[in-house]
Image (cartoon, rainbow, N blue to C red):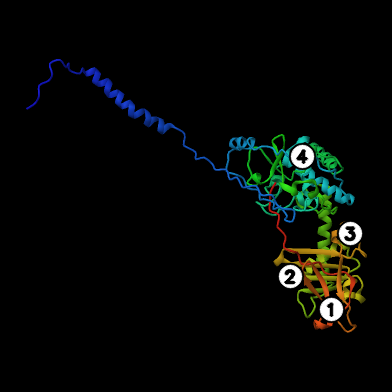
């Protein structure tokens, strides 16, 4: 039985029904429209903050690779602005004056000028700050010990260079004006002649404020110049005593700068000529085959017509593709051994030595600086060891010991090596390298 409509309830007018229907439709349509037109939700990018570790003085600090947090520029600027500056003292670096020959100085100036321009642009203030970091690195044992080696460290790797312009094609894509180059060279010359940029202190790293490198949280933020932020290592490695390493005055030739620098163009031409001369000597039989008893050893009488700088190219050509190779040269044919092992007297009269050990990542050429003067004393053969007093019938071989290579008697018992030992001055093959931390890219 259907109940009767209450007598006092009026019927709903058709107009109200339409209004209610429209309200219902809008309640569904408007949220749907908002959702469909809203910009996509970007997930929050997580910033990886590494715990700061103070590296003790006995351990060489690692150099982090150039890798950045996944942040857009504005987010990076916001984050960087929130990183506080160190409250520890920020002393100015000691003045630096480059040594070496005129050619070495010219190559160093052009390497630094290139870094100043491509890292800071045609801006003197920014260039001075970059130049100070380069000098600081050159003095620090975690980095190479010449200006050019610091600037172009890792240039052969697209993701491993210390300064990105050396491996990202910038030197090819963009050429600065002659006026800009002149100004940068003037600024570089001042920096390498004792001018100090106090603001960055002993900073060894920097980056622009629109990126956040992964290494940032492990260093102390000490200064800002223009859009660059400057950092130094924490603890002892960021203090002045850590920057006492002797800088080498022997600057390498950088092939990438040959198009920009007369000094590097001339050096590249000389290196090429030396390599051609050495290769010609090899092809004409001037370099003998390896010794019969050891295919990886060469005992060579050096051609007096060859310039000393060509000896390394000659050794490289003789060693060919060998992973391990010893090349030993004498200026006097009468003193050149005919077989190994060789005696301490023969070692002492050696004029040049070259050792390659690719398994250990080692390759080194050394000259006898008593005969051949070298601007870089690190290229001189020098070794003082304690060796046993030997009988006249004893022969010697080169033996690898930790940190050195020494001459020891062949086929002698332990009992025969006891007794009085005397100090012997000998010139030997360079030591196989100790395991040391490999600097990774960073800036």
Q: Earlier in the sequence, mark 1 or mark 3?
A: 3
Assess disc 3: are there few (<14), some (14-19) or many (≥20) residues with their C-alpha within 10 Å of its C-alpha: some
Residue at 81% x, 70% y: name it: 405
Residue at 72% x, 56% y: name it: 59
Residue 265 placed where, x, y %? Answer: 81, 51
Assess disc 2: are there few (<14), some (14-19) or many (≥20) residues with their C-alpha within 10 Å of its C-alpha: some
Pointers 3 and 2 in contact (CB under 8 A)?
Answer: no
Q: Secondary structure at mark 2?
A: strand
Q: Is residue 224 above or below residue 246?
A: above
Assess disc 4: are there few (<14), some (14-19) or many (≥20) residues with their C-alpha within 10 Å of its C-alpha: some
Q: Is residue 246 above or below residue 304?
A: above
Q: Secondary structure at mark 1?
A: strand
Of circles 2 and 4, which is in front? 4
Decide which of 56, 137 is in the foreground and name it: 56
Residue 45 placed where, x, y %? Answer: 54, 41
Name the residue tied to disc 3: 374
Name the residue tied to disc 4: 90
Pointers 1 and 3 in contact (CB under 8 A)?
Answer: no
Tell me how far mark 4 sits from mark 1, CA to CA. Answer: 55 Å
Of circles 4 and 1, which is in front? 4
Name the residue tied to disc 1: 396
Name the residue tied to disc 2: 324
Query: Which quadrant would residue 212 be assigned to in this image?
Result: top right
């Amino acid at each position: 039985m259907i109940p009767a409509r209450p007598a006092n309830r009026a019927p709903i007018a058709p107009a109200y029904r339409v209004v209610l229907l429209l309200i219902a439709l809008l309640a569904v349509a408007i949220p749907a429209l908002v959702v469909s037109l809203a910009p996509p939700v970007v997930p929050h990018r997580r910033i990886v903050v590494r715990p700061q570790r103070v590296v003790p003085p006995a351990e060489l600090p690692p150099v982090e690779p150039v890798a950045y947090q996944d942040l857009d520029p504005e987010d990076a600027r916001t984050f960087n602005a929130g990183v506080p500056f160190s409250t520890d003292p920020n002393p100015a670096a000691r003045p630096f004056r480059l040594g070496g020959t005129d050619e070495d100085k010219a190559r160093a100036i052009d390497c630094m000028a290139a870094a100043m321009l491509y890292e800071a642009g045609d801006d003197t203030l920014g260039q001075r700050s970059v130049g100070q970091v380069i000098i600081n690195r050159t003095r620090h044992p975690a980095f190479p010990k010449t200006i050019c080696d610091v600037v172009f460290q890792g240039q052969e790797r697209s993701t491993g260079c210390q300064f990105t312009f050396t491996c990202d094609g910038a030197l090819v894509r963009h050429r600065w004006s002659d006026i800009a180059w002149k100004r940068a060279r003037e600024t570089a010359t001042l920096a390498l002649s004792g001018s100090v940029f106090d603001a960055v202190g002993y900073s060894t790293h920097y980056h622009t404020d629109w990126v956040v490198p992964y290494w940032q949280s492990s260093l102390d933020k000490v200064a800002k110049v223009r859009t660059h932020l400057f950092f130094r290592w924490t603890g002892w490695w960021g203090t002045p005593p850590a920057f006492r390493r002797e800088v080498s005055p022997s600057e390498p030739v950088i092939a990438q700068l040959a198009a920009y620098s007369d000094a590097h163009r001339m050096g590249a031409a000389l290196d090429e000529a030396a390599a051609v001369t050495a290769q010609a000597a090899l092809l004409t039989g001037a370099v003998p085959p390896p010794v019969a008893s050891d295919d990886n050893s060469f005992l060579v009488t050096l051609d007096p017509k060859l310039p000393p700088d060509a000896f390394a190219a000659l050794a490289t050509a003789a060693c060919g593709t060998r992973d391990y190779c010893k090349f030993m040269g004498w200026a006097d044919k009468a003193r050149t051994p005919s077989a190994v092992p060789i005696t301490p007297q023969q070692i002492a009269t050696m004029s040049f030595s070259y050792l390659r050990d690719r398994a250990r990542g080692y390759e080194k050429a050394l000259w006898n600086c008593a005969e051949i003067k070298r601007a870089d004393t690190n290229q001189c053969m020098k070794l003082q060891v304690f060796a046993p007093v030997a009988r006249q019938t004893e022969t010697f071989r080169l033996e690898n010991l930790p940190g050195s290579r020494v001459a020891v008697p062949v086929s002698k018992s332990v009992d025969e090596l006891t007794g009085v030992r005397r100090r012997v001055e000998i010139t030997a093959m360079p030591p196989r390298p100790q395991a040391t931390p490999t600097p990774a890219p960073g800036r």
